[in-house]
Image: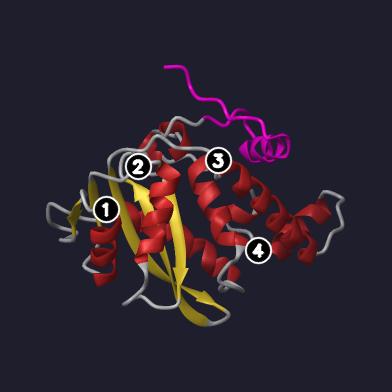
């Protein structure tokens, strides 16, 4: 929880020391990698109930000091972060892998896809979402905008600043951000619910991280709310 709300491993180390726990910041990173991988394997088996309108966007992130691009797909209604992909380039990136991943996670294609004017989205949408209406006209003051994606991008940007960049493209930190966004963090725009709550997946208990880890170890199904 400390890590994904913005604390660095060294700050977490100091906090734990105050609690009487002496552990290195390297061990903390190993814990994060271990449990994110465990949760990701478990959560990838679930199918969120997302709407028929999705959004896609990209933002740059630093990996070992080099500029890379994080592409993401989010559901418009539930704010569920469906898929992500890190690319070396922005123009000419293969967004088809991103869309195929999103289709696999959601178990369907969207009726409407909102993106910016990046050509990579158009090519991939024609290939992977042939029956989807692709909206590319983005105007923040107009009738169509991508503000919801920008807010999610801000979450990633704030976390990345604390880390001073990422160490590798396949870092578990980005997957951890996605899990935190979907299953742990209450969203003001959702009246305090998580995207997972709105997508029909409920994580029981006050300590949602602990519930996810315990269920992942036991492979216990998450509860769906009663209709």
Residue 78 versus residue 96 in the image, above or below: above
Task: Give the secondary structure at mark 2.
Answer: loop
Task: Give the secondary structure at mark 3.
Answer: loop
Cα distance in 3D space between marks 4 and 1: 40 Å
Return the x and y of residue 140 as percentages of the image width and height: 19, 59
Q: Residue at x 72, y 62 (%)?
A: 29
Q: Quadrant of residue 89?
A: bottom left
Residue 67 versus residue 15 in the image, above or below: below
Pair 4/2: label in front: 2
Give the residue pinned by disc 3.
45
Give the residue pinned by disc 2.
108
Res. 141 mark = none
Return the x and y of residue 46 as percentages of the image width and height: 52, 38
Residue 175 as seen in the image, left or right of residue 122? right
203 in the magenta segment? yes
Res. 129 mark = 1
Pair 3/4: label in front: 3
Q: Residue at x 54, y 48 (%)?
A: 179
Res. 8 mark = 4
| Magenta residues, start to end | 202-227
Q: Quadrant of residue 99?
A: bottom left
Confirm or deny contact between disc 3 and disc 1 (CB under 8 A): no
Cα distance in 3D space between marks 3 and 4: 30 Å
Cα distance in 3D space between marks 1 and 2: 10 Å
Question: Looking at the image, is mark 1 or mark 2 earlier in the sequence?
Answer: 2
Cα distance in 3D space between marks 4 and 2: 37 Å
């Amino acid at each position: 929880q400390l890590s994904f709300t913005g604390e660095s491993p060294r700050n977490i180390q100091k906090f734990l020391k105050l609690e009487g726990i002496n552990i290195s910041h390297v061990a903390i990173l190993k814990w994060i990698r271990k449990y994110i991988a465990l949760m990701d394997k478990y959560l990838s088996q679930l199918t969120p109930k997302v709407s028929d309108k999705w959004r896609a966007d990209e933002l740059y992130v630093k990996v070992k000091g080099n500029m890379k691009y994080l592409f993401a797909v989010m559901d418009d209604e539930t704010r569920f972060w469906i898929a992500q992909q890190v690319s070396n380039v922005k123009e000419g990136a293969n967004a088809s892998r991103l869309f195929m991943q999103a289709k696999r996670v959601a178990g369907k294609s969207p009726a409407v896809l909102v993106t910016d004017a990046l050509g990579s989205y158009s090519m991939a949408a024609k290939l992977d979402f042939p029956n989807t209406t692709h909206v590319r006209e983005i105007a923040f003051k107009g009738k169509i905008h991508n503000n919801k994606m920008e807010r999610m991008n801000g979450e990633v940007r704030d976390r990345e600043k604390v880390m001073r960049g990422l160490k590798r493209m396949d870092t578990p930190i980005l997957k951890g951000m996605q899990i935190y966004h979907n299953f742990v963090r209450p969203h003001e725009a959702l009246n305090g619910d998580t995207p997972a709550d709105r997508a029909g997946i409920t994580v029981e208990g006050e300590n949602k991280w602990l519930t996810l880890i315990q269920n992942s170890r036991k492979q216990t199904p998450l509860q769906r709310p009663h209709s």
